[in-house]
Amino acid sequence: MLSSVGDANRYYFDQAARVTAIRLATEPGIDAHLSINFMPNAVYKQQSCIRATMEAARIYGFDPERLIFEVTEAEKIDDRPHLRRIFDEYREQGLMRAIDDYGEGFAGLNHLIELEPDLVKIDLNLVRGVDRHRSRQAVIRSTALLCEEMGIRLIAEGVETREEFETLRDMGLSLFQGYWFARPGFESLPQPNMP
């Protein structure tokens, strides 16, 4: 399906994906946050875009304060001031904002400074094998310190082994996601593997 998304329909695809995610998140009836990856190059007018998202949350009874909007660092941003306006609008609406795939992409530290996210998700390529790689540990440790000083919560994504989890936990991280905890399911809740 993604191969059929282009410049002409990117905005509509982004909107439809948001509404579907909100609808599906309400069906299990659990009280959790919902992360929505958005395509910054597809969001033309942040006010109208967020209005549709807030309307979907209202229709399906999803508390908008539990929405987290993630921009991936792996996507090259065509208009950085525009992305900042999007993040500012989300902040004004009381929504959480996150940088996904941190350490993988185009902006790095500039994203932290310019966007002032609530959350940063460390890219799985930095997490992979962190228990055996001192250089990865050093990068994650320094990123954790930087985020702490900036008031940003840090999430390690792509945790697949007990050793990765324990190493990251021992480094002071407290938020994780990855196959070690649960495998994703299509339109279903994953079965957690609680370490």
Image (cartoon, rainbow, N blue to C red):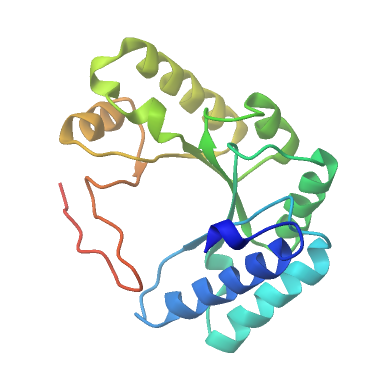
Figure quadrant of residue 113: top right
The image position of residue 57, as x and y in percent, is 59, 79
Q: In the image, is residue 146 above or below residue 81?
A: above
Q: Nearer the viewer, residue 115 or 153?
A: 115
Q: In the image, is residue 14 above or below residue 62?
A: above
Q: Nearer the viewer, residue 172 or 75?
A: 75
- Left or right, 99 with respect to 45, comes to left
**Which residue is found at the position 62% from the left and 81% from the top?**
56
- Left or right, 34 with respect to 48, comes to left
Figure quadrant of residue 65: bottom right
Q: Nearer the viewer, residue 7 or 108?
A: 7
The image position of residue 72, as x and y in percent, is 58, 43
- Left or right, 109 with respect to 173, comes to right
Find the residue positioned furthest to the bottom: 59
**Which residue is found at the position 65% from the left and 33% from the top?**
112
The image position of residue 23, as x and y in percent, is 50, 80
Q: How many marks?
A: 0
Q: In the image, is residue 61 above or below residue 87?
A: below
The image position of residue 107, as x and y in percent, is 67, 29
Q: Nearer the viewer, residue 92 or 140?
A: 140
Figure quadrant of residue 155: top left
Find the residue positioned furthest to the top: 134
Q: In the image, is residue 145 above or below residue 47?
A: above
**Which residue is found at the position 43% from the left and 23% from the top?**
140
**Which residue is found at the position 38% from the left and 11% from the top?**
135
